[in-house]
Image (tube, rainbow, N blue to C red):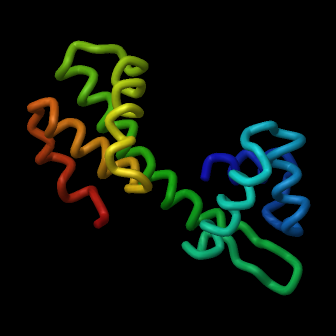
Amino acid sequence: MEALKYAILYKGSNEFSKPELIGTIVLKLRLMDYNEAKALVEEAIKRGIIEQRGEKLIIKEGALKEEEKREDVFGEMIDYIAKKLGWSHLEVLEDLEKFSERYGDLDKKIVAYLYGLDKGIDMSKFKDKLEV
């Protein structure tokens, strides 16, 4: 969802056509490939972060900020796990990537929670922050 924030900053507006938004993310910002950007836009529409009015897409900045708060929980979990294990953030993220292969398309926060539990870390402080 961070790519949407950068697209708004790049254009200076929260209104896009679908090809313009995908093109901005892929070609101008070089944050994702075409399929990833297309999937991001579709997911954001489903979640109500992007409102579709005819051919126009309007990124709701309030909803985008709420989503960013939820994503901050993931970063907080990675910080906590790294501190408990005495590892760097990169080491945790690399090991988490391998660990996540078992779970397929599960939300990254839930995978991080399970990873922490698997490593013997008390993750109870994050339990209420997860949406299942």
Residue at the farthest front position? 102
72 left or right, relative to 77: right
The relative height of residue 66 versus residue 12 in the rendered view (above or below) is: below
Q: Residue at x 36, y 41 (%)?
A: 100
In front here: 121 or 79?
Answer: 121
Q: Residue at x 9, y 38 (%)?
A: 122
* Residue 19 x %, y %: 89, 63
Looking at the rendering, in which quadrant would you find the C terminus? bottom left
64 left or right, relative to 16: left
* Residue 108 x %, y %: 39, 48
The relative height of residue 129 versus residue 124 in the rendered view (above or below) is: below
Q: Residue at x 32, y 45 (%)?
A: 102
The relative height of residue 111 versus residue 56 in the rendered view (above or below) is: above
39 left or right, relative to 128: right
In front here: 14 or 46?
Answer: 46
Residue at the farthest bottom position? 54
* Residue 83 x %, y %: 23, 20
Q: Quadrant of residue 98?
A: top left
* Residue 130 x %, y %: 28, 58
